[in-house]
Amino acid sequence: MEDIKNTLTLHKGRKVERIRKLRGWTQTELASRLGGVSKQAVSKMEQSKNISDEKLKEVAEALGVTFDGLKNFSEEKVLYNSINFYENSGVNATNISANIETVNNPLKETIEMFERQLKVVREELIEVLKKKE
């Protein structure tokens, strides 16, 4: 298990692939962001265990991440940071339902207010039209 873990953390091409997929990009999209390299070149790079730091910097910029972030990327860190962020965010079901209630009530009140204003404008328009007759 440890050998598999080390292989995944050291394989730079897989890191590029995972970040690309997390972005929701195809190999073609990454290729165009890299300055018009081919999709096949991206595929080959993603299969490469080693990528030069110079090339990795270009790829990091194209992916919109830092060089260190790409070089040190691991899914464990992403999961840890995501879970840690969520647990410390103070978000829970009670907060979410309270926020939904707060959002829905003003929206309902706003609609009712606009309907009242529209009714007043219609009545005024009807009066103006009656006076012209």
Image (cartoon, grey):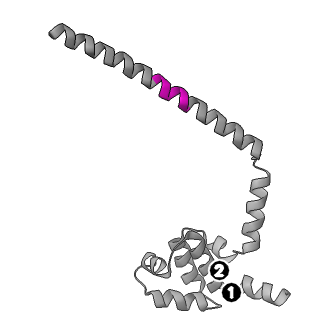
Q: Secondary structure at mark 2?
A: helix
Residue 116 falls inside the magenta stretch: no
Q: Is residue 111 magenta?
A: yes
Dividing the picture into quadrants, the one containing residue 121 is: top left
> In the image, residue 130 lies at what x, y percent?
21, 10
Q: What range is drawn magenta here?
A: 107-113
Q: Position of residue 85 (x, y in %)?
A: 75, 55
Q: Which mark is residue 15?
A: 2
Which residue corresponds to the image point at 65% horizontal and 91% vertical from the top-left?
49
Which structural element holds mark 1? loop
| Depicted 72 relative to depicted 109: above or below | below
Most extreme residue toward the top is 131
117 on left or right of 42: left
Q: In which quadrant will I find the C terminus?
A: top left
* Disc 1: which residue: 11
Question: Residue 63, how many percent across, how many down?
Answer: 54, 72
Q: For the residue marked with disc 2, what is the amino acid?
A: Lys
Distance from the alpha carbon under mark 2 to that under mark 1 = 7 Å
Q: Is residue 12 left or right of residue 122?
A: right
Q: Are marks 2 and 1 in contact (CB under 8 Å)?
A: yes
